[in-house]
């Protein structure tokens, strides 16, 4: 579908490419956080999850690294699941007072913790200090896409150093923070190129504490991002080249990690693929699986990776005709011996279906608690930037029929 743009000598069109200015990858490199943070500030606000920061075995090493670099540190927020408007507003109201010059935000966790950190870093400079949580509430909403007053991000956020502890979301390399509001019934993004973390430390060792379900959900989120950013109607050559590197690593690594969590080579490959998936989606777009996953998270509280894992095989089948040439390219990237043409595309579809089954996550919408009577609502509320990128155009009626068939 898009392969003409990848041929040498063909005009690739206009494009932008925004990624973190610093990327440090490798096992054991989390201990470099002090030196990295010291290049951006003198005081660190730590934000993470209960397991990824507060009780994590790597926490003492991170704090010692910051001390050695003469960076003072304090924990200012703890993630409690995917960030909500309420959680962000409460965290903003509880931030330390005083001058914020020289502060760097260090995010340690999965996509939820990193998104919370990016939102706090952004709003700490774009909203006044010292307000109550109730006052911050509307300020948060007004800076989300599609709700509130659509106020843009104009002031550079506090610099963020991101250390992912899962291999999947790619949030360490994206320009947005996904925030939901159960009270208002939405899940939207706060987005700006200014929100890309200033530095990323991807240490595969930090993912060792993930249980099997977290590994499966994060891994399928990564694979969904890689595939959807490749076949997206807004895809561009550079992000697609990242997918051709990252997807073969991910489909090789995930089954191995699920059967042997101690496989260090698979762990490194999965972390590498997750980073590339974040860069690819941030500079391209996504598709149906992500569009529906957001609405499913609002309706059922389904974790994002679980929702992506459920919807990926559905989206692959829905786009099979229009994206067949891209599927063939992806299959041949995974297996250079695969036959060209329709045979390779069919093998790719079967491969993704088998991988999804191996992960052992929910396979039907009923399995995550969706009521049959809510299928129409789910279809109506899946519209957004992700669905607009889907290679096959889908209206609400199309989507409702697809979802009903997979209930």
Image (cartoon, rainbow, N blue to C red):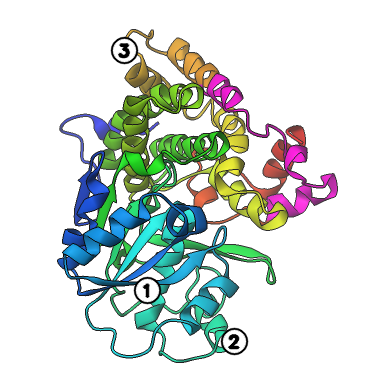
Q: Nearer the viewer, residue 34 or 335?
A: 34
Residue 227 drawn at (x, y percent): 44, 34
State the CA–CA distance, disc 3 to disc 2.
Answer: 56 Å
Q: Is residue 191 visible?
A: no
Q: Secondary structure at mark 1?
A: helix
First reached walking from the N terminus: tag 1 or tag 3: 1
Q: Where the N terminus falls, by quadrant?
A: top left
Picture residue at 54% right of the left edge, 17% below the top: 350
Q: Nearer the viewer, mark 3 or mark 2?
A: 2
Q: Are marks 3 and 2 in contact (CB under 8 Å)?
A: no
Q: In this view of the protein, can residue 31 be seen by the observer?
A: yes
Residue 287 in picture, x, y percent from top left: 51, 43
Q: Is residue 336 above or below residue 372?
A: above
Residue under label 3: 336
Q: Earlier in the sequence, mark 1 or mark 2?
A: 1
Q: Is residue 202 above or below residue 134?
A: above
Residue 134, which numbered label? 2
Q: Splitting the image into 4 quarters, where does residue 152 fall?
A: bottom left
Which of pointers 3 and 2 lies earlier in the amino acid sequence? 2
Give yes or no for residue 79 being in the magenta stretch. Answer: no
**Which residue is depicted at the point 37% across and 31% down?**
267
Q: Quadrant of residue 99?
A: bottom left
Real-space Cα distance between discs 1 and 2?
Answer: 18 Å
């Amino acid at each position: 579908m898009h392969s003409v743009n990848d041929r040498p000598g063909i005009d690739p069109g206009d494009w932008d490419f925004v990624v973190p200015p610093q990327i440090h990858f490798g096992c054991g490199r989390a201990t470099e956080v002090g030196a990295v943070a010291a290049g951006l500030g003198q005081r660190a606000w730590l934000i993470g999850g209960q397991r990824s920061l507060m009780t994590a075995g790597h926490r003492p090493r991170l704090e010692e690294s910051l001390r050695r670099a003469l960076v003072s540190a304090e924990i200012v927020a703890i993630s409690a699941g995917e960030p909500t408007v309420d959680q962000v507003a409460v965290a903003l109201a509880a931030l330390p007072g005083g001058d914020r010059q020289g502060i760097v935000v260090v995010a340690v966790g999965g996509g939820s913790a990193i998104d919370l950190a990016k939102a706090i870093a952004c709003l700490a400079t774009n909203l006044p200090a010292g307000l109550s949580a109730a006052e911050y509430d509307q300020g948060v909403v007004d800076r989300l896409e599609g709700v509130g007053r659509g106020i843009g991000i104009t002031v550079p956020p506090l610099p963020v150093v991101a250390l992912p502890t899962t291999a999947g979301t790619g949030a360490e390399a994206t320009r947005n923070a996904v925030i939901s509001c159960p009270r208002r019934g939405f899940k939207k993004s706060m987005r700006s190129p200014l929100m890309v973390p200033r530095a990323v430390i991807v240490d595969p060792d930090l993912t060792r504490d993930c249980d099997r379900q977290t590994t499966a959900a994060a891994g399928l989120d990564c694979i969904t991002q890689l595939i959807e950013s490749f076949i997206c109607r807004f895809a561009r050559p550079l992000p697609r080249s990242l997918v051709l590197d990252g997807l073969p690593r991910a489909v090789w690594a995930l089954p191995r990690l699920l059967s042997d969590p101690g496989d260090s080579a698979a762990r490194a490959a999965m972390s590498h693929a997750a980073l590339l998936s974040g860069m690819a989606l941030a500079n391209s777009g996504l598709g149906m699986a992500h569009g529906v996953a957001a609405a499913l998270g609002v309706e059922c509280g389904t974790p994002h990776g679980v929702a992506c894992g459920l919807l990926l095989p559905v989206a692959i089948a829905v786009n099979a005709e229009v994206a067949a040439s891209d599927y063939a390219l992806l299959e041949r990237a995974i297996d250079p011996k695969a036959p060209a043409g329709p045979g390779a595309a069919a093998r790719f579809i079967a491969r993704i279906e088998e991988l999804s089954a191996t992960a052992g996550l929910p396979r039907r919408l009923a399995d995550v608690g969706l009521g049959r009577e809510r299928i129409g609502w789910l279809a109506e509320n899946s519209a957004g930037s992700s669905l607009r990128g889907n290679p096959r155009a889908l209206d609400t009626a199309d989507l409702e029929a697809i979802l009903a068939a997979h209930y």
